[in-house]
Image (spheres, coloured by chain):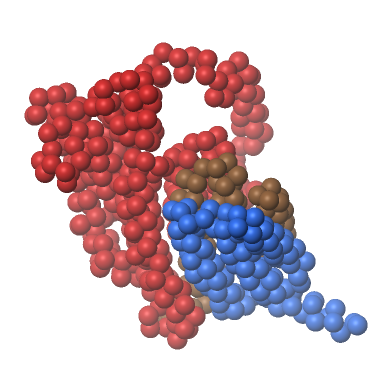
């Protein structure tokens, strides 16, 4: 298959199928992120790349038989390896034995009380995935967020940042073209929808404690709203809404917030990212305290960085189109 | 009841895929893709009801959004789209 | 009362599935791009609306219904809009293949 269009669309469909498998396997958080990033954002970015490069692959110099054989052999080996694994969801599997009952009892409040623990010692959020991501393995998630930051910085270094926008007049908004009436419906519908998409992003962000959601997904949805605006109204209008200097500041701000929470807990006497020292609330009754406050701040940091990096990558890719 | 709905939606998705494979023009394929996306949203919603986990509705909403953005992006970035070459020739020519 | 709610939601879901399948058949068998668009998009939105309505009856007045209403409104706004965008871009770039498709349809009619 030589047409890159078809390849991109098939990749989008494949990401979507991957998300469905994850749903069936009872992992809605991962399915969420996969659907948002794979089926949505990656497809948009790859399509914007195709608009810059050609759309057919050059003829390959080597044969395609050898990679096919290697991939098939590896796949078969992996399938053979999984034949030995315990059944899905088996309670006697080793992964569920040693630390898992303690984690579960500590984390979910209902199991917490049933196990007779004192109410204040656990993490206390209902969504175990968020608890593990943001509290038990918070340091790893800080690493992931820094990786996203690095990706954004890499794109900025390679494709150029703010300076390019002024030199390339990259706006294809057809404000002064006679066939404008074709796009009126699209513009109105987009203007109608974008506030609600942003609201949905905020909902997913803060609902991550109780249901599928969290910082990564919310950041991607937020970026998707701005990218939608950019696709329909043109790059110049989007640059007015989200000026690159602000976006680039936000990229770093998110990671700063995350790491800053860790430093704050160190200053308050605990370990790095140990949220239990955030116990004493600043405004009792208004702000959550302890684990909830820690997870809130950390997820906020992740969401801000992910949204800003996605928007930056979009600007960098689309900003390179020369006016044809 | 949900079984009937799921079966019907799956059949429609297969038909849409047939059109996506056949369709002589690229617009047929994009149309089929759009229909596939909408049916997928329905499938997720019905599946959520089937397995009694209404958390899936967030995912359905997300996928509806991604479907929309995907089609708009396809139209924006392809030569055949709304911003296609014919219009640009009008503008610069 | 619960039985009536069940019956109504059954009717809605079955009707919605029927429309969805009809739309699918239409998109495969109709001769031209514009006719496929017409058949596909309209039945798509209608089928989606009915199925979601049926699911709403099943769920009762809970948060789940609110979310279903939001999905419904979203589909009602975006699905026709994207089909409109597609149709207008097809009309702008009316390439030879679409005309060829349409002329084959009129040929078939002429031979009646």
State the quadrant of the N terminus of chain C: bottom right
- Left or right of A270 in this view: A53: right
Q: What residue is at 28 percent from the left and 41 percent from the top? A: A299
State the quadrant of the C terminus of chain C: bottom right
Q: In terms of depth relative to the viewer, which is nearer, B92 or A309? A: A309
Q: What residue is at 64 percent from the left and 55 percent from the top? A: C3
Letter of the chain in red: A
Horizontal and vertical percent position of residue A79: 62, 23
Q: How many marks?
A: 0
Q: Is residue A252 above or below residue C34?
A: above
Q: Residue furthest front?
A: C1
Letter of the chain in blue: C
- Left or right of C109 in this view: A23: left
Toward which corner of the image does residue A133 lie, by quadrant? top left
Q: In terms of depth relative to the viewer, which is nearer, B39 or A252? A: B39
Q: What residue is at 51 percent from the left and 63 percent from the top? A: C72
Q: What residue is at 67 percent from the left and 58 percent from the top? A: C7
Horizontal and vertical percent position of residue A107: 34, 28
Q: Is residue A265 above or below residue A232?
A: above
- Left or right of A273 in this view: C110: right
Q: In terms of depth relative to the viewer, which is nearer, A279 or A235? A: A279
Toward which corner of the image does residue A320 lie, by quadrant? bottom left
Horizontal and vertical percent position of residue B71: 52, 62
Residue A149 appearing in the image: no
- Left or right of A223 in this view: A240: left
Q: Is residue B22 above or below residue A128?
A: below
Q: In terms of depth relative to the viewer, which is nearer, A166 or A244? A: A244
Residue C12 appearing in the image: yes
Letter of the chain in brown: B
Toward which corner of the image does residue A215 lie, by quadrant? top left
């Amino acid at each position: 298959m030589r047409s890159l269009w078809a390849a991109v669309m098939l990749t989008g469909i494949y990401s979507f199928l991957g998300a469905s498998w994850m749903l069936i396997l009872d992992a809605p958080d991962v399915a969420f992120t996969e659907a948002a990033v794979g089926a949505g954002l990656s497809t948009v970015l790859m399509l914007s790349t195709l608009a810059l490069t050609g759309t057919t692959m050059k003829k390959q110099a080597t044969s395609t038989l050898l990679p096919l054989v290697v991939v098939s052999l590896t796949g078969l080996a992996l399938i053979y390896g999984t034949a030995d694994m315990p059944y899905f969801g088996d309670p006697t599997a080793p992964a569920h034995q040693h630390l898992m009952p303690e984690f579960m009892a500590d984390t979910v409040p209902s199991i917490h009380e049933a196990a007779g623990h004192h109410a204040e010692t656990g993490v206390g959020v209902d969504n175990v995935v968020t608890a593990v991501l943001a509290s038990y393995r918070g340091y790893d998630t800080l690493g992931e967020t820094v990786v996203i930051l690095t990706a954004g910085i890499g794109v900025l270094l390679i494709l150029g940042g703010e300076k390019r926008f002024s030199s390339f007049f990259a706006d294809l908004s057809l404000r002064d073209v006679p066939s404008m009436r074709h796009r009126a419906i699209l513009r109105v519908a987009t203007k109608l929808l974008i506030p609600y998409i942003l609201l949905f992003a905020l909902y997913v962000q803060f609902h991550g404690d109780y249901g599928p959601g969290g910082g990564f997904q919310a950041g991607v949805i937020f970026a998707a709203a701005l990218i939608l605006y950019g696709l329909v109204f043109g790059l110049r209008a989007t640059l007015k809404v989200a000026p690159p200097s602000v976006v680039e500041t936000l990229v770093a701000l998110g990671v700063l917030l995350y790491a800053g929470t860790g430093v704050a807990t160190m200053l308050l006497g605990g370990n790095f990212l140990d949220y239990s020292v955030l116990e004493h609330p600043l405004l009792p009754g208004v702000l959550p305290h302890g684990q909830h406050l820690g997870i809130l701040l950390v997820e906020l940091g992740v969401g801000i960085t992910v949204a800003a990096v996605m928007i930056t990558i979009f600007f960098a890719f689309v900003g390179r189109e020369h006016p044809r | 009841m949900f079984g009937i709905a799921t079966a019907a939606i799956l059949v429609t998705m297969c038909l849409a895929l047939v059109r996506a494979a056949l369709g002589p023009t690229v617009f047929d394929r994009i149309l089929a893709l759009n229909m596939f996306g909408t049916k997928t949203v329905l499938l997720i919603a019905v599946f959520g009801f089937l397995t009694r986990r209404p958390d899936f509705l967030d995912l359905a909403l997300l996928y509806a959004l991604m479907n929309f953005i995907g089609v708009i992006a396809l139209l924006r970035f392809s030569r055949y789209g709304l911003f296609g070459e014919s219009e640009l020739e009008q503008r610069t020519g | 009362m619960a039985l009536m709610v069940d019956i109504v939601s059954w009717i809605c879901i079955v009707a919605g599935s029927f429309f969805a399948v009809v739309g699918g058949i239409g998109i495969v068998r109709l001769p031209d791009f514009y006719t496929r668009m017409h058949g596909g998009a309209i039945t798509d939105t209608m089928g989606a609306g009915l199925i979601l309505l049926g699911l709403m009856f099943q769920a009762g007045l809970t948060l789940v219904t609110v979310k279903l209403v939001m999905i419904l409104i979203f589909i009602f706004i975006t699905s026709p809009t994207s089909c409109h965008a597609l149709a207008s871009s097809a009309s702008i770039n009316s390439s030879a293949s679409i005309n060829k498709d349409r002329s084959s349809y009129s040929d078939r009619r002429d031979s009646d």
